[in-house]
Image: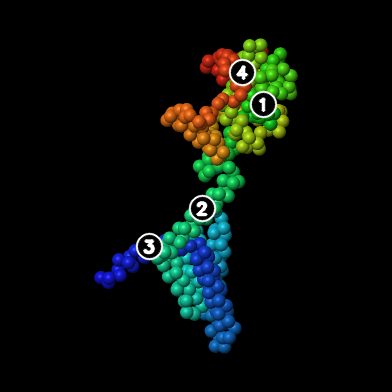
Amino acid sequence: MPKNASAVQHQVAPAGDPSPQTCLQIARQAAILAVTAADDAMTAICRNRSGATARLEAAMHAAHKEAVEAEGHADRAEQYADDPTMPSSAPLYCARAAVDHAVRAQSAAGVETTAADLRAELERKLTAAEYAERETERRREEAEKEAEERAATGMDADNRDRAARNRYLAEGHVAELGWTAGHVRVLEAAASGRLYWRGGRARQAARHGVWNGGRRISRERTQALFAARFLVAVRQDDGTRVLTPSPMGQVALELARLHPAGLHGSDQAAYEARFARVRRRHKRRDDQKAAARVLPPLDSSARKLYRKPVTLTEQQARAERDAVDRWEDEGGYCPGADTPRPAAGAPANPPVRIILPLHRHTAVQPALW
């Protein structure tokens, strides 16, 4: 064995696919060689004086057919290289196909099959230096792409995937709710913590804790959302009921925001959609109408599968809170160090809130009044 055998073994990395740029170059070269062979076959017919044109025409048509295929694969290689949804091996597949068609085009035209030399470039093993350089370039491109995605979305890759799954989930379940944009506005008011029910009316308070006045909210939609358990009521000392989204209501609100196209344009259209869903469940017309007036609950699978994405800012804030908690657990107060204090004005004893009881084994809550 030669003395430098071990060094050679270290220099040659495991066989790897050529870079996309190499695949594009080889595919285009193969297409050029195939077209040149087809042109040579056509030139041979034009210069023929022996009268044996049938064989030359067959060769020309065969070479032309292979040249068209080679050009098509070269074009597709460029398209696939620019398409992030395509697998990374797609340009290599197209390059190999282009080379094969180029070899057949040259063979049909009766010229030297120089395109076969391109196969060696596609099958050549990478050296350790080439492999390391490619990996470095790949990681750099991935880091740049990740930085762009984070800047655009404010989320890391895992949470972007979670957001994409939520959008897909919304497309399949929002239309089944039978909502309009008005139902979303009611839940958004409830999510703000300022929606309250008093005197048979729903209003959104101007400030949290001031349960008097404010913008009027649809009474009918509020009652329907409460009856369907999308809202829960908390009784205050003065009899006012503060309405907040239930866990199911919070998920439904997030899904409706992700897929507003699933909302109906009017209350009548929403009612007709709900009527179409419940029509076969009841025989009597009155029962069908009564069932259509009730909002259906969010499908349990959507509630289980939905996961709220966490932004980078939220992750950083959580990490800072965890660091403070860990510091307190490890040593507590240190002389000369500022101790985090609660926000000014925070009530020492929060008021006791009473949750309205719900009927068991029913999908509808008692009325608000």
Q: Earlier in the sequence, mark 1 or mark 4?
A: 1
- Count of number-bearing discs: 4
Q: Is residue 258 visible?
A: yes
Q: Residue furthest front?
A: 336
Tell me if residue 49 comes above or below residue 13 in the rendering: below
| Residue at (67% x, 26% y) in the render | 189
Residue type at mark 4: give it: Ala
Q: Pointer 2 and pointer 1: residues touching (CB < 8 Å)?
A: no
- Find residue 158 and report its horizontal and vertical position in percent: 50, 42
CA distance separating discs 3 and 4: 67 Å
Query: Which residue is at the front of the view, 273 or 236?
Result: 236
Which of the labelled discs sits on residue 142, or is there none?
A: 2
Q: Earlier in the sequence, mark 2 or mark 1?
A: 2
Q: Residues within 10 Å of mark 4 (few under 14, many from 20)?
A: many
Which dot, 2 or 4, sits closer to the camera? 2
Which dot, 3 or 4, sits closer to the camera? 3
Q: Which residue is mark 3?
A: 13
Which dot, 2 or 1, sits closer to the camera? 2
Q: Which residue is mark 4?
A: 233
Tell me the quadrant of the picture where the C terminus can be found: top right
| Residue at (51% x, 53% y) in the render | 142
Q: Which residue is mark 1?
A: 189
CA distance separating discs 2 and 3: 22 Å
Tell me the element at label 3.
Answer: loop
* Horizontal relation, residue 349 to residue 186: left or right: left
Tell me the element at label 1.
Answer: helix
Q: Earlier in the sequence, mark 2 or mark 3?
A: 3
Q: Pointer 1 and pointer 4: residues touching (CB < 8 Å)?
A: no
| Residue at (52% x, 28% y) in the render | 339
Q: Residues within 10 Å of mark 1 (few under 14, many from 20)?
A: many
Q: Pointer 2 and pointer 4: residues touching (CB < 8 Å)?
A: no
